[in-house]
Image: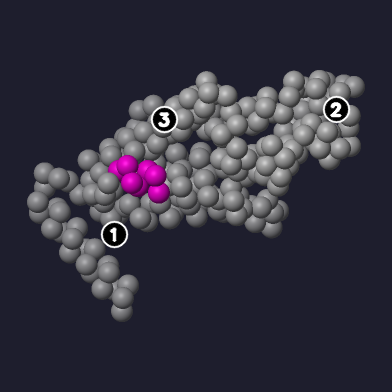
Amino acid sequence: MTVAVKNGLRGQILDESARLFIEHGFNGTTINDIAASLGVTRTNIYYYFKDKKEILEELTGDIFMTGRMIAKKAAEPRADPVLALRELVEIFARVVLSNPVRYRVIERNEGYLGPELKVKVAAAKKKVFNDFRSVIQEGIGAGAFRPVDAGSAALAIIGMCSWAAWWYHPDPKRPIDGLIQFFVDFVLNALVPAGGRRRSRLDARGIIENVRNELAFLEKALS
């Protein structure tokens, strides 16, 4: 068996295990089930993983990968919080939409992870939340975003992207780039004031002007 074939089978084992874990649950799936579904022997499975728990733990790698990518981007110097938030949403949405089945199995079977890994997963999720909240709060302070609760906005964005794993099915006729752009537009339309104007907490006239602009925008939309 060549290295390329080995690496290909390893990925197939992870993908098929994720599908079976979702359909039958972690406890309802055996190594025999995974092997039979792939048309290989148990020995082929054990070549890569010592048991199904190790398979599940490997699948959690998507969470850590997402966290690392977002943390790296959030740590970069930024002059425009709108662009920074756009990039974070793009990263998160792309990971979820590129691996919807894997992402779904993680959310559904977290309870079967070992205590130490559970702590690491919780920390990774918290870091993602904090990075989103920080960028949003920075945008609010700069007047680029509406004065909303940054934590609630961060949770709304994370929830929207995460939920896509439950309804999105890969389809060549529906490329993920279009959906990612939809998510980005949806988020920015919710946070950026009407007309793209920026507020300043220290500029009362600017605040009043923005309120007037948004009322005009609302009136136009209703008519």
Give whichever of discs 1 and 2 has the lower sequence position. 2
Indicate whether 158 appears above or below 173.
above
Q: Nearer the viewer, residue 76 or 59?
A: 59
Sequence-wise, the earlier of marks 3 and 2 is 2
Q: Measuring 9% from the left and 51% from the top, which residue is drawn there?
A: 204
Taking the spot 59% from the left edge, 51% from the top edge, the residue there is 166
Residue at the disc numbered 3: 127
Q: Are marks 1 and 2 in contact (CB under 8 Å)?
A: no
Kind of residue at disc 3 = Lys
How crowded is the residue under tag 2: few (<14 C-alpha within 10 Å), some, or many (20+)? some
Of the residues shown, which amino acid type is indicated by label 2?
Arg
Q: Is residue 192 magenta?
A: no
Picture quadrant of residue 96: top right
The stretch of residues the image draws in magenta is 150-156
Mark number displayed over residue 194 = 1
Q: Quadrant of the N terminus?
A: top right
Up-down relation of residue 130 to residue 191 (above or below): above
